[in-house]
Image (cartoon, helix red, strand yellow):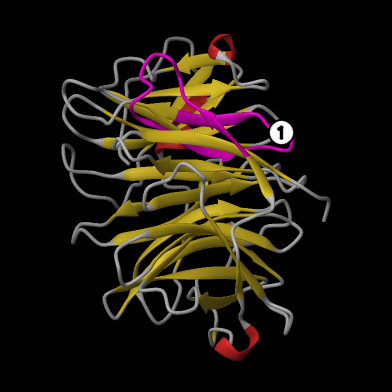
Amino acid sequence: MAIERAFAAGIPAAVLAALTACAGPGSDVPSAAPLAHARSAAYERATGSSGFNFMTVDDPADPSFNEILGVNDGSKLVGFYGSGSASDPSEGYIVVSPFGSTNFREEAYPGAADTELTGLNDKKTFVGFFRRMNNDIRGLVLVSGIWNNYKHPRGMPRGKSVTELLGVNSSDLAVGYYKDSSGVNEAFTLDIPSGTYHPLSPPGGNNSIATGISGRGDIVGYLQKSGHSVGFLLRKGSYTEFSYPSATDTKFLGVTVYDQIVGSYTESSGATHGFLLTNPLKPSIAWKQIDEPNAAGTTVVTGINQSDDIAGYYVDSSGNTNGFFATPQSLR
């Protein structure tokens, strides 16, 4: 994932300045806190992948490559089509139920080479990132048809910089990451109205990426530890690490106020599965494996809303990457 673009006309100067400047400390999200140990495997159980009704969601502009990356409580989805190659550039989109060919609205950051929309809230705020022609990658915010971009001030030099916004909650607090001057991924939060950012520094690992934030401010993501990806949950100043049982890599990608976390894990065979984690900080912790029925070895769950609808993408037997939306077969 990677992308950026130039500003659309008409952006207020005050907003532009806030989004492109380092605003310093001021966020109420802590940058470091004691790391809780990962939950004991004795409390973890993995169950089957049934329980959802799946629907493939592909933009007709490019049915061979789609990723759905966010879902809100109104079951509106965001994502992109196109692999991002020179011959197949990525373009973001917003799609609403019933997810037919006429329900897609394509969104491209003005002047960008590629655009990906990664998250949204219920207030019509959209986040993502875009790639400029010089290969800079910047975070983007789209509100009421107005585009803004964000380049982390501590990132790499022009032409090499990477800043991505990957999730946003109802308070317009976004999460993401940037690459520092050494090429290491550094997670952060960004308060969109003020432009205030705050670093997130999970102890015990490196290359941290924040991917999702709930309405009450819980943050999820993943980091590298001993050469493997480990999911993390930040709640009230405390970090807790998690790994799907027997997985080689675990990535947390979305979280709700109901303590439900979704993401993906990779097993030793190389296959990637989605999952739903419930009660992560309780003895009743439970993991549920999720595989789209048409998947051929890869399913990734990227988002979940408060109705337990999930979204993500999968790779089929023809090698196509397809978006999906799924509803629970029974109520929580």
Q: Residue at x 47, y 45 (%)?
A: 166
Q: Residues within 10 Å of mark 1 (few under 14, many from 20)?
A: some
> In the figure, residue 91 lies in which quadrant?
top left
Q: Image quadrant for the C terminus? A: bottom right
Three-letter amino acid code at the position of disc 1: Asp
Residue at point 69% right, 54% down?
256
In-image side of 206 versus 50 (left or right): left
Secondary structure type for disc 1: loop
| Residue ID for mark 1 | 122
Quadrant where the N terminus sits is: top left
Q: Position of residue 142 (x, y in %)?
A: 53, 25
Q: Which residues are magenta?
A: 54-79
Residue 156 forms part of the magenta stretch: no
Position of 10 relative to 168 (above/below)? above
Q: Position of residue 149 (x, y in %)?
A: 41, 31
Whether residue 118 is visible, yes or no, is no
Residue nearest the viewer, comparing 19 with 204: 204
Q: Residue at x 30, y 25 (%)?
A: 114
Q: Was residue 64 drawn as part of the magenta stretch in this picture?
A: yes
Q: Nearer the viewer, residue 104 or 115?
A: 104
Residue found 42% across the figure and 34% down from its top: 322
Query: Is residue 219 among the parts visible in the rendering?
Result: yes
Q: Position of residue 253 (x, y in %)?
A: 51, 54
In the image, 19: left or right of 55?
Answer: left
Tell which of 295 and 155 is nearer to you: 295
